[in-house]
Image (spheres, helix red, strand yellow):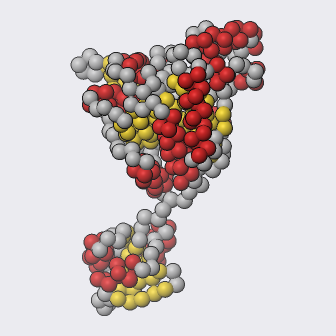
Amino acid sequence: MSFRPPKGTDDIGAPESNLWRDVLGEWERWADLFGYPLVMTPIFEATDLFERGVGTDTEVVTKQMYTFTDKGGRSLTLRPEGTAGVVRAFLDSGAKGPWKGSYSGPMFRHERPQAGRRRQFWQVGVEYLDVEGPAADAEVIELGYRFLTAVEVPGLKVILNSLGDAVCRPGYVEILRRYLAEKRDVLCADSLPIVDVNPLRVLDCSVCAPVLVDAPGMKDHLCEPCADHYTQVKKSLEGLEVPFSEDARLVRGLDYYTRTAFEYVATNLEAAQNAVGGGGRYDGLAESIGGRRAPGVGFALGVDRIILASTRKPEVRVDVYLVSESGPIEALIAASALRRDGLRVDLDTEGRKVEAQFKAANRLGARAVVVVPEDGDDVDVRVGEERARMPVASVAKWLEERL
Ligand code: HAM
């Protein structure tokens, strides 16, 4: 067969898929611990939603969207991110916040594929809406930090900045534009054309970084309310014992951010793809997509990158491997009884040699082996060095104390 998964997409099977299930299970646990119920929104939305929400001069919108026209002539786009859709759903529901939602699912961006940069990738995230205070920002940042710590992302760092708001940002952008205009002859070919249109994005350019070390930072030009908000977020994080560092160059790739912006970085990954997540406050997003004012804050984490970075071993999902000396039907009947008793059981249905069955048990890392003997009603149960003979009906109880 000559079909392969489309460029930038992956087939994920066991054992790697076991780690995915563990990480996604851990995500659900942390989202619940912080009170963020699941919200499910469509995988495609009106193209306009992303243009207005994410911003028409972001790379995501100009270069990376999977856009198509459906049979009714509507322009639709596979979601490149989750925030715009969740905010749309919240506004559409007519709910009044404070409102919390968490999500988990595939996103699509037409990027140049490499490790940790896929065209279909999986995000988990939260959005917290109709909230203005810095405690909301701190809670959201803490949730991401606790979850990433639980899934064993090594060298985890939280990087923080404030991007100001509609009051103070325009003045800062002007100062930055003037500074960059003087640096024109040392800027890279990608940055040059955006100095006037989107000077903030130049700060994000890794090629230009070395010549922009003394660039003015937003945090020195915040208006008083934004400066207060930023100070309170930092104080709250200190109180919550969430370590963070500040980086005046952190600008994020989507246009909706105001005030708090942050990223979670896994320092053991390649620098270009080491952001395992990012987020921030977006007080103007709801209005920019035609809704009422609904300030909010949230983040999304890239599960593909978390899996790459994590040092966690996947949980063994086979409690019992059944080895049969008397053929597959007897084994299947014993397996059925054990499964109905709540044990996760695997077995060989092809009548392979006993040694091959033991090998399979080993390969799967089964926590116990149950041997169905050639004669007699009892089975032989083995856990590590311990062995016992008993009726099938007693196995679950016996194993309960040992597994
Ligand atoms: P983002 O920074 O574009 O933010 O994406 C969040 C995370 O998704 C990234 O840090 C990265 O781990 C992962 N990611 C992004 N693109 C790819 C890709 N092509 N392949 C693999 N992983 C990728 C957002 O999406 C915002 N919606 C976050 C947010 C939520 N802000 C507020 N609320």
Q: Is residue 227 left or right of residue 402?
A: right
Quadrant location of the N terminus in the rendered image: top left
Pinpoint residue 288: horizontal percent, then vertical percent.
40, 18
Eyeballing the image, is 292 above or below 124? above
Res 370 → quadrant: bottom left
In-front residue for pair 315/151: 151
At horizontal 48% and vertical 62% (from top left) the residue drawn is 315
Going by the image, does 210 lie left or right of 193? right
User: Within the image, what quadrant is residue 317 found in?
Assistant: bottom left
Closest to the observer, 196 or 46: 196
> How many numbered tags mark residues here?
0
Residue drawn at (41%, 71%), measured in percent from left and top? 319
In the rendered image, is residue 371 in sight?
no
Q: Is residue 117 above or below residue 282?
A: below
Q: For this rendering, which residue is in front, 108 or 245?
A: 245
Q: What x and y, as percent, mark residue 16?
A: 49, 53
Give the vertical position of 151 relative to 322 (above or below). Answer: above
Q: Is residue 38 positioned above or below 13 on the image? A: above
Q: Is residue 223 visible?
A: yes
Residue sticking out furthest to the bottom: 376
- Which picture quadrant has residue 116? top right
Looking at the rendered image, the quarter that the C terminus falls into is: bottom left
The image shows residue 257 at horizontal and vertical percentages of 51, 25
Instruction: Give the residue drawn at x 60%, y 37%.
Output: 234
Q: Is residue 5 left or right of residue 349?
A: right
Name the foreground residue: 286 vs 357.
286
Q: Position of residue 113 (x, y in %)?
A: 54, 33
Residue that lies at the very extreme toward the left in this rendered image? 72
